[in-house]
Image (cartoon, rainbow, N blue to C red):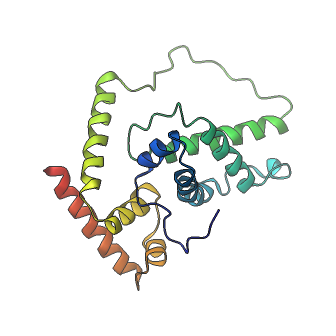
Amino acid sequence: MADTGGMLVSNESTIELIVRIRGGDSVALEALVQRCLPPLKRWAHGRLPRAARSYMETDDLVQDAVMRVIGRLGTFDPRHVGAMQAYLREAVTNQIRDEIRKIVRRPASQELVDDYPATDPTPEEEALESESYERYRAAMEQLRAGERELIIGRIEMGWSYQECADRFGFVTPDAARMATNRAIARMKTALRS
């Protein structure tokens, strides 16, 4: 993957990148991987039990999970902002579970619960999520490229203000925070219109 000097390969939202990837765009795939790997590695750090680390390192586990997810992007339905990170985290969690299963000879027996609650969203929740995503997407279109990058970096990728300052050339984290807050305020205004 090419070094971009800390800048985003794309200032498009994650969902837009997924649409482009489905169309066969390899640059969008590179941008998505560049965007998703660092926060996912930070999130996964320390989650793999020590006993499983002798077989696989956390970074390898994260990369394996990302590669599996990329192979299934055709069936992935991003319904809200942050859905890609949530999907990747779930994939890493499943990968960790698989590694634990490999090292455990006999899993502990557990009682099955008869009345396990459903976790799928209701049709009403799905409609609200879809409507919210469309409003978010329309508001993002009204922002300048730099504002979109700040919002994507801070909200979708979970970067700290220090990371935003480093990646986007702000002198201090406070300058990045102020610019991000202005971008979010403009997006809120666009959401209300």
Question: Would residue 38 be found to the left or right of residue 188 on screen?
Answer: right
- Name above or below for residue 4 compared with residue 16: below
Name the residue: 47% across, 58% down.
157
The single residue placed furthest to the left in the displayed view is: 193
Residue 75 point in image, percent of width and height:
53, 30
Name the residue: 34% across, 65% down.
145
Question: Would residue 160 be found to the left or right of residue 134 on screen?
Answer: right
Question: Would residue 30 be found to the left or right of residue 191 on screen?
Answer: right
Residue 38 point in image, percent of width and height:
59, 61
The single residue placed furthest to the bottom in the displayed view is: 171
128 or 20: which is nearer to us?
Answer: 20
113 or 67: which is nearer to us?
Answer: 67
Name the residue: 41% across, 47% down.
16
129 or 19: which is nearer to us?
Answer: 19
Name the residue: 21% across, 56% down.
188
Quadrant occupied by the N terminus: bottom right
151 or 121: which is nearer to us?
Answer: 151
Counting the numbered discs, the total is 0
Residue 65 point in image, percent of width and height:
67, 44
- Name above or below for residue 133 compared with residue 184: above
Question: Would residue 89 be found to the left or right of residue 103 on screen?
Answer: left
Residue 180 point in image, percent of width and height:
32, 69
The single residue placed furthest to the top in the displayed view is: 114
